[in-house]
Amino acid sequence: MTTDTMHYGRFASALHWLIGVALLAEIVFGFLLDEIAPRGTPARAAVINLHKSTGVLLGLLILLRLAWRWRHAPPPWPAAMPVWQRSAARMLHAAMYVCMLVLPLSGYVASNLSKNGIKVLGYWLRPWGPDLPAVYTALILVHDVTAWLFAALVAGHIAVALKHALIDRDSVFARVWPWAGPPHPTLGERS
């Protein structure tokens, strides 16, 4: 098997797609919060708490993904892939990982610096910090700006992945597609 046909293992691929789809849904949900439940309406608290619950669960999945990635090296890039594309891919992935950490962390800390706290799956978690409206507002701004930045990075990631799959027809997209072929030979199911 050449390095051009090496793939992530099924667990890493499944985690990639699960987190990817869930993050997209959570970001769209976050962007639509005011349309779904406008401020001051009775449904607002339930909708916000659903967004927070999902964000906490996604944050935990992201930590699992980072721990897995830290312990399991990805398969090598195809030999034919230009060096500049490899560098761009590494930078894009690093920026996406930063956003994946900042998004749930900023929302979590902001919620704990407000009187509302977090309700996860129906259980209210008492805020561990004081009610600091100015800090809350700043953290929500970080959360919102990061969501827009992440959405742009994800759009770029998807566009490049589709380019590799449909135009270049190289093995880059297949590396993370769970049904594309055998896993990386030295990583097997561990990747």
Image: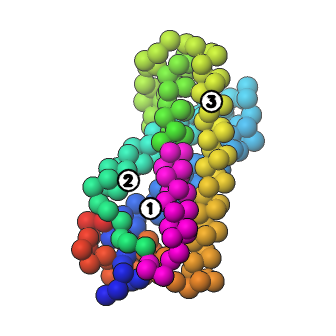
Residue 116, position as x, y percentages in the image: 55, 21
**Residue segment shown in magenta:** 78-100
Residue plotted at (29% across, 60% down) = 72
- Number of on-image labels: 3
Residue type, mark 3 in image: Ile
Task: Point out the tag, 2 or 3, that comes first from the N-terminus.
Answer: 2
Task: Point out the tag, 1 or 3, that comes first from the N-terminus.
Answer: 1
Residue type, mark 2 in image: Arg
Name the one closer to the observer, 129 or 118.
129
The residue to which callout 1 is attached is 16
Locate the N terminus by quadrant.
Answer: bottom left
Residue 36, position as x, y percentages in the image: 71, 42
Q: Which mark is residue 65?
A: 2
The residue to which callout 3 is attached is 140
Residue 53, can we see it? no
- Based on the picture, tell me whether residue 89 belongs to the magenta stretch: yes
Task: Point out the tag, 2 or 1, that comes first from the N-terminus.
Answer: 1
Its colouring scheme is: rainbow
Q: CA distance from mark 2 to mark 1?
A: 8 Å
**Label 2, residues with CA under 10 Å away: few <14, some 14-19, many ≥20:** some
Location of residue 186 with respect to 103 vertically, above or below: below
Locate the C terminus by quadrant.
Answer: bottom left
Marks 2,1: beta carbons within 8 A: yes
Location of residue 119 with respect to 70 vertically, above or below: above
Residue plotted at (43% across, 25% down) = 125
Majority secondary structure of the magenta segment?
Answer: helix
Q: CA distance from mark 1 to mark 3?
A: 26 Å
Residue plotted at (26% across, 66% down) = 190
